[in-house]
Image: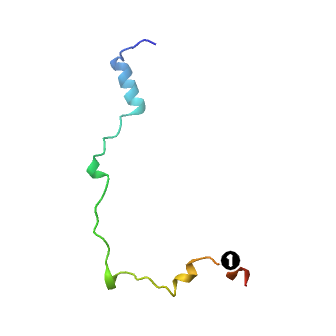
Amino acid sequence: MENEVATSAEVAARLARFGKLPERIQFHEMFEEKKAGPSGAEAVSYNPEGSWNHFSCLAWDLGL
């Protein structure tokens, strides 16, 4: 293939068909900083007595 220079009519037709690429996203726009959630008494604490029901137990499922 030969290197061909596109004419302005071809460029206009390509822009009409495909449009243009979106603007580049800057690095600082790719993330967001937030403060950490509450800690201590305000945070939801771990409850060891209630956590057992979140796991599957085969013996319990079989009724053993």
Spot occupied by residue 36 in the image (x, y as percentages of width and height): 30, 71
Spot occupied by residue 15 in the image (x, y as percentages of width and height): 37, 29
- Based on the displayed image, in which of its 4 quarters is residue 3 positioned? top left
Q: In the rendered structure, which amino acid carries the disc numbered 1? A: Leu
- Based on the displayed image, in which of its 4 quarters is residue 31 positioned? bottom left
- Residue shown at the point (31%, 41%) measured from the top left: 24
Please give left or right for residue 48 compared with residue 60 in the image: left
Helix, strand or loop status at disc 1: helix
- Based on the displayed image, in which of its 4 quarters is residue 7 positioned? top left
Spot occupied by residue 18 in the image (x, y as percentages of width and height): 41, 32
Residue found at the very far top of the displayed protein = 2
- Residue shown at the point (27%, 69%) measured from the top left: 35
Spot occupied by residue 43 in the image (x, y as percentages of width and height): 35, 81
Q: In the rendered image of this protein, does residue 19 appear above or below residue 10?
A: below
- Residue shown at the point (68%, 77%) measured from the top left: 58
Please give left or right for residue 53 compared with residue 48 in the image: right
- Residue shown at the point (56%, 78%) measured from the top left: 54
Check the image and tell me how it is coloured: rainbow
Q: In the rendered image of this protein, does residue 35 appear above or below residue 50?
A: above
- In the rendered image, which residue does mark 1 sit on? 58
> In which quadrant of the rendered image does the C terminus lie?
bottom right
